[in-house]
């Protein structure tokens, strides 16, 4: 009996350890796979959540003019088509990313520019990191030849972006963008960008009104 109890306890520990290690669940019940790169643990999919951690809804803005004028948190799906959410997640403006109610699941956060730099350096720097961070699943990137053989498991998808000045949508299949929490001047914040035709990754400041995808990193 004692041996059976020990076996059951060990099995439960293993099961809970696997759950904690391999997935994370947001407040809406969306489950995301995770991947370890170097010493960091990242979501391996884009965020889909529609509520802040306290349960408050993130405003869903479809109108282009309203999107460009918003100075509070907002989200949308690419081209206002919910069919894109499953693969590409939601697009968020930076105000949602920076809101103190938090869009990341408990125990996770949106990365700073410094944390993204650690990730990029772990994958051989700006020139090559983009290639190893892209998904190896065919049919997403318009030019898949830049996906390296040493895929990191980060599984970046080219979900495009929403233009911050008029709310139009661009570059699905060609580019991927993610927000950082680090601001840059009054109206700008840092972001990462991947390219279909190149294996590099660039990190640039963009208007906070742009709609970009979000990846979370474990605390």
Image (cartoon, rainbow, N blue to C red):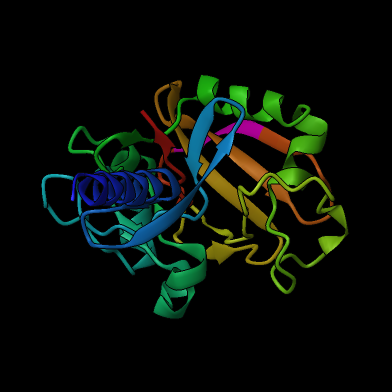
Is the residue 154 above or below the residue 144 in the image? above
Q: Please give left or right for residue 114 compared with residue 95 in the image.
A: right
Pick out the residue farthest to the right. 145
**In the rendered image, is residue 73 in sight?**
no
Which is nearer the eye, 124 or 22?
22
Q: Quadrant of residue 119?
A: top right
**In the rendered image, is residue 147 in sight?**
yes
Residue at horizontal 36%, vertical 43%?
Answer: 17
Residue range in magenta is 203-207
Q: Quadrant of residue 120?
A: top right
Residue at horizontal 20%, vertical 32%?
Answer: 100
Residue at horizontal 64%, vertical 32%?
Answer: 203
Tell me which secondary structure the magenta stretch mostly adopts: strand
Q: Position of residue 129 (x, y in %)?
A: 74, 37
Examine the structure image and report whether residue 162 is included in the region drawn in magenta: no
Q: Position of residue 212 (x, y in %)?
A: 48, 50
């Amino acid at each position: 009996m004692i041996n059976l109890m020990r076996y059951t306890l060990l099995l439960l520990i293993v099961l809970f350890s696997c759950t904690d290690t391999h997935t994370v669940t947001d407040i809406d019940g969306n489950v995301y796979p995770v991947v370890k790169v170097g010493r960091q643990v990242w979501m391996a999919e884009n965020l889909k959540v529609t509520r802040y951690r306290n349960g408050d809804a993130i405003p869903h803005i479809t109108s282009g003019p309203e999107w460009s004028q918003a100075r509070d948190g907002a989200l949308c799906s690419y081209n206002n088509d919910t069919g894109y959410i499953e693969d590409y997640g939601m697009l968020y403006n930076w105000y949602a990313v920076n809101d103190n109610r938090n869009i990341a699941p408990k125990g996770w956060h949106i990365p700073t520019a410094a944390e993204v730099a650690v990730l990029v350096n772990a994958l051989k720097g700006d020139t090559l990191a983009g290639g190893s961070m892209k998904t190896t699943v065919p049919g997403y990137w318009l030019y898949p030849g830049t996906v390296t053989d040493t895929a990191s498991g980060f599984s970046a998808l080219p979900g495009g972006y929403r233009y911050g000045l008029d709310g139009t949508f661009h570059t699905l299949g060609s580019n991927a963008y993610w927000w950082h929490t680090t601001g840059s001047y009054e109206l700008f914040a840092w972001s990462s960008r991947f390219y279909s035709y190149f294996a590099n990754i660039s990190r640039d400041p963009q208007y906070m009104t742009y709609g970009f995808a979000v990846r979370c990193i474990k605390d």
